[in-house]
Image (cartoon, grey):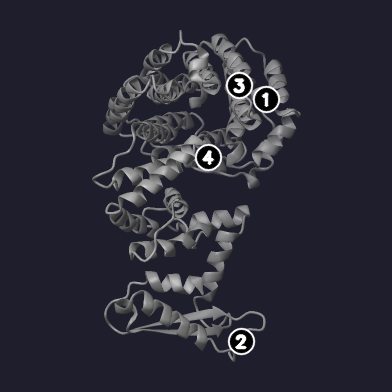
Amino acid sequence: YLLMRLVLRLLPIDDAKTRVEFFIEQRGGFGANMSLFPIQQLLETELQALDAARFKDVRISLQFANKNHHPANGYVDALAHMWAAASANSKKRLKNSALLGHCLLEPQHDVIERSYAAIDQQHILSPKDWYSLVSAVSDEPSSSLLHNVLTELGKQIQQQASIWQGYLDFVSQLLQHKHYHLLEIKTALDWLANHTPQECTLPPMLILHWYMARLACANHLGQHDMPLISKAIRLGQSLLNENAAEICHLHLRIAVAATNKFEFDSAQDILDFWQDQDPRLMGLNNYGKYLSSLGQLAAFRGKHQQAISYFDQAIAAFGQLSDPQEKHKQQRQTKIYRLIALSDNSQISDTTLQQELEKFWQQPLATAAQRLSKSDNNLRFEQHLLLRAMISRPALQQESYIKTADDWQFEEAHPWPLIAAYRAILLHNTHPTKASLYMHKAIDTCRESQGATLQWMGEVLALWANHYGIKVSSLTNKQLEQLQTQLPHAPWSSLAQLKKASDHTQAMQDLAACLPFNFH
C-alpha cells in the first residue's frame, strides 16, 4: 500500500485523465476473486485530499495477477534477484547490466513520502528524517529522485529559519558525540550551506568541520582543492585558542592532501607546527595520528628505519586510548603502515618479513592468503598489504591465494585498483587473458576518477603492465602535460625510467619510485 501511494505521488501526471494500473503478484490465498476495491477507494480518497488538483482525474485499478500475466514479470523477478542476492554471480550480473545505481527502494526511502508532505507544507520533516534523507543521497546516482526531493525541500527550508536551525543543531550533536560517517556529514553540511536562510549563518566551528569533511573526501578520491586548503588554514588559525585539538585534526588532513600531491616538504611544514607542542594539547588520538603521519612521510622519502620508529611510537600512543574499538582500529592501521615500511626495507629478509606478517595475522601466511583472497571491502587494506608483499617479495607468493580466483571481489575505492593490478601480475604467466582483464580494470578505475593522484597511478600501472605483455595505452602528450601541471612534484624522472626498464626487477623498482610507500 505504501509503495503504491509513493508511486502515485511521484508519477509525472499531467492535466489529462489518467489511469494507473497496479498488478500485484498472486501469492498464497490471494487470488483474482478477492476484491481490492476498498483499497483502491482508500488510495483515491487519500490522494485527492492531499492534492485535489493533481489527482482529480486519476483513476486507479488494482488486481492480482499470476506470473504469466504480464511479459515484464520475468524482468522484475530477475532484477529483484540481482539486487537481493549476495552471491558473487548476482553481483557480477548486476555490474554487467550497467544499470545506473540501484532502481529499487532502499529501506531509508520511506522518508521520501514524508519529505513530499514537508514540501507541500503539510508536515514538518524531523531532523532525524532530514538527516536520513540527506545522508542517503551520498550513495545515490546523479539521476536519483532524492536529489530533486532535497532541492525542493531546501527551497522550503530557506524560508523557515527555525527548521533549518533544528537541522543544524542535529548535525552539531552528531559531531559532538562523534556519531557519524564522514561522507554523510559532508553531504549534510553541504546542504545546510547551500540552503541557509538569509538571517542565519553556519558557526565557525561547524564550518571548520565542513572543511575537514570536504578535505577528507577529496583526499580519499585523490583530488586536490588548494583554495579549500587555504581557507581551512586561515579559519583554523583564528580558532586555535578555542579548540586546539580540532585544529590539529585539520592540520593532519591538510598534511594528507599535501602528501597526495607529492609535496612532502609542505606536509612536513604543516606537521612541524606541533613539534614543540604539549601532546595533551592535541589530544591522545591526534598525537598518535601525528606520530603516524611523521612515519608515513619518512616512508615516502625512503627513510624506512625512521618510519618504523615513528610507527612504533604511534602504536604505543594509541595503546593508551580508553576506547577499545578506537584503540584497535588505529593500532591495526598503523601496524599495516609499519609492515609496508618493513617490506620496503632491503635489510629485512623474506623470512623475517614473513614472520612479522604471520605475527600480525596470527596464522600461517598460506592460511591468511586464502582467507584474505575472498575478503570484502572491510579488509581491503590487509589484502593490499598481502598482495604488495607477495609481488615485491616473490618468495612470499602463496598458491592458496590464486586458487580462490573465482571468489575474488572488487570495489572501486582505494586500494582496490592496486589489488586488481597485483592480481594481474600473479596471473600473467598461467592465465594471461584473466590477467589482462584485471589490469585493465585497475587502470580504468584509476582513469575514471577525477583525482590527479589516481590519474598518475593509472599511468604508472599502464607502463608497468606493458613489461608483462599486457598492452595498455598510455595517456596522450596533452593529458600528460595537464597531469604534470596538477602534480609538478610527482617523480616524473622515475616515470621515464619505468618506460625504459630492462626487466621485471627494474620495472618493480621504478614502480616503487613512482608510487612510494602505500601509493603502491
Which residue occupies 68% across, 43% down? 404
CA–CA distance in space, label 3 to label 2: 63 Å
Q: Residue 396, labelled with which disc? A: 1
Q: Nearer the viewer, mark 4 or mark 1?
A: 4
Q: In this picture, is 91 found above or below 42?
A: above
Helix, strand or loop for disc 1: helix
Residue 291: where, in percent of width, then height? 53, 16
Contact (CB < 8 A) between labels 4 and 2? no
Which residue occupies 57% across, 41% down? 377
CA–CA distance in space, label 4 to label 2: 48 Å
Mark 3 or 1 closer to N-term? Answer: 3
In terms of image quadrants, where is residue 443? top left
Instruction: Name the residue carrying label 3.
Output: 318
- The answer to whether residue 488 of the structure is visible from this angle is yes
Q: Residue furthest top?
A: 276
- The answer to whether residue 392 of the structure is visible from this angle is no
Query: Tag 1: Cα neighbours inside 10 Å, few (<14), some, or many (≥20)?
Result: some
CA–CA distance in space, label 2 to label 1: 63 Å
Helix, strand or loop for disc 3: helix
**Residue type pointed to by label 4:** His
Q: Nearer the viewer, mark 4 or mark 2?
A: 4
Pick whichever, 283 or 250, lies toward us: 283
Instruction: Name the residue carrying label 2.
Output: 31
Pick whichever, 505 or 201, lies toward us: 201
Q: Nearer the viewer, mark 4 or mark 3?
A: 4
Q: In this picture, is 301 found above or below 160?
A: above
Instruction: Name the residue carrying label 4.
Output: 179
CA–CA distance in space, label 4 to label 1: 40 Å
Residue 92: where, in percent of width, then height? 55, 54
Q: Residue furthest bottom?
A: 33
